Image (cartoon, rainbow, N blue to C red):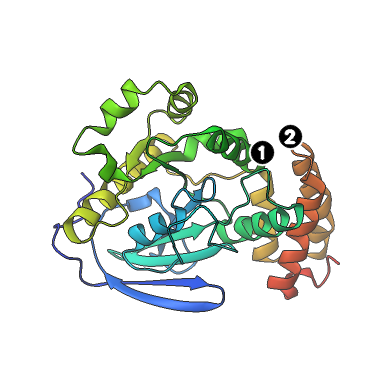
Amino acid sequence: MCGWGSEREPQGWVGRGVVGGREKRARAGQQGAWGALCERGRSPGHIKLKFILVGKAGAGKSATGNTILGNKVFESKLGAKPVTKTCSTGSMIWNGKEVVVIDTPDVFSPEASDTETCREISRCIALSAPGPHALVLVTQLGRYTAEDKEAVKRVWEIFGVEAKRNMIVLFTRKEDLGGNSLTDYVRNSHNKNLKELIQECKNRYCTFNNKATGAERNKQVNELMEITERMLKENGGRCYTNELYSEVQRILDGGTEEKYMKIEEKLREHMAKQKTPKKEAMTTGLQNMLRHEFPGVFLFFF
């Protein structure tokens, strides 16, 4: 157990989210013990844990993010059309530790435009640098389709297949189980693609009822945190990172003119290794986004 405290209605944590330039604040609470598993920030004793929500449009990513944060930070509506238009972040302080959730728009489907994909993936990489601790693949219970499989393929193309070491499968619509076991559901499923994914993720999965509140909501979040904690221990307590993330972090941290001169070349080398026709546009999109978001960083680079 992680020691997240009681299952009473949460009190005491302060969460915030940035959505479309507007900041929202929330209150709730829970306790936990992440120790050295989480990324330590620049200030002494500060610990940060980052989740990126991925998956096809309509799977319930935004609602899942709101459940984790305990507050409606991300816009969420029932329907097939995507509501989220841009990468958004929400965070909460949980027992002195910052939990950051990054919600993503519909950039994991083949229908997503090149421009949109490049812009939002670039933004996601910058927001999650030096790398996420967990990629949470959100999919609806009983609805893992070819679209979901394609979304997973896009995740591997963007983040690299090694990212599966930090992936957790989260099923929405827990209420559809009707009290039955999620383990039995997965074991008895005839969906070959789903079973292969679960196996690739080393059987890391859980389920949410995104309408749950109070003790029920806390129990769901506690389970996700416990799975994440075990996964991080297996991974040596490190977030997922790769060459691209390392270079982006160097940009964000600042450095010498000589360092900046090598960044574009290394970004292109990284994207060339990915099996996506959008690699060049994604690299350019990342550069343009960072120039806009962090203009001082590119004083010498461009």
- Between 214 and 180, the one lying in front of the other is 180
- Between 245 and 176, the one lying in front of the other is 176
Numbered marks: total:
2
Q: Are marks 1 and 2 in contact (CB under 8 Å)?
A: yes
Q: Is residue 20 left or right of residue 74?
A: right
Tell me the element at label 1.
Answer: helix
Where is 12 relative to 5, above or below?
below
Q: Amino acid at mark 1?
A: Glu
Q: Amino acid at mark 2?
A: Lys
Dot 2 corresponds to which residue?
Answer: 275
Instruction: Report, in whole angstroms, how far the alpha carbon at label 1 lies from the one at label 2.
Output: 6 Å
Q: Dot 2, crowdedness within 10 Å: few (<14), some or many (≥20)?
A: some
Residue 168: x percent and y percent? 42, 40
Q: Quadrant of residue 13?
A: bottom left
Dot 1 corresponds to which residue?
Answer: 157
Tell me the element at label 2.
Answer: loop
Q: Dot 1, crowdedness within 10 Å: few (<14), some or many (≥20)?
A: many
Residue at 29% across, 44% down: 174
Q: Is residue 189 left or right of residue 290?
A: left
Residue at 63% across, 45% down: 109
Work out whether mark 1 precedes mark 2 in sequence or the reverse, and give the earlier one. 1
- Between 301 and 43, the one lying in front of the other is 301
Does residue 255 appear in this view? no
Q: Quadrant of residue 21?
A: bottom right
Residue 229: x percent and y percent? 34, 44
Residue at 62% across, 43% down: 159
Does residue 125 appear in this view? yes
Residue 95: x percent and y percent? 27, 63
The quadrant in which the C terminus is found is: bottom right
Residue 122: x percent and y percent? 68, 57
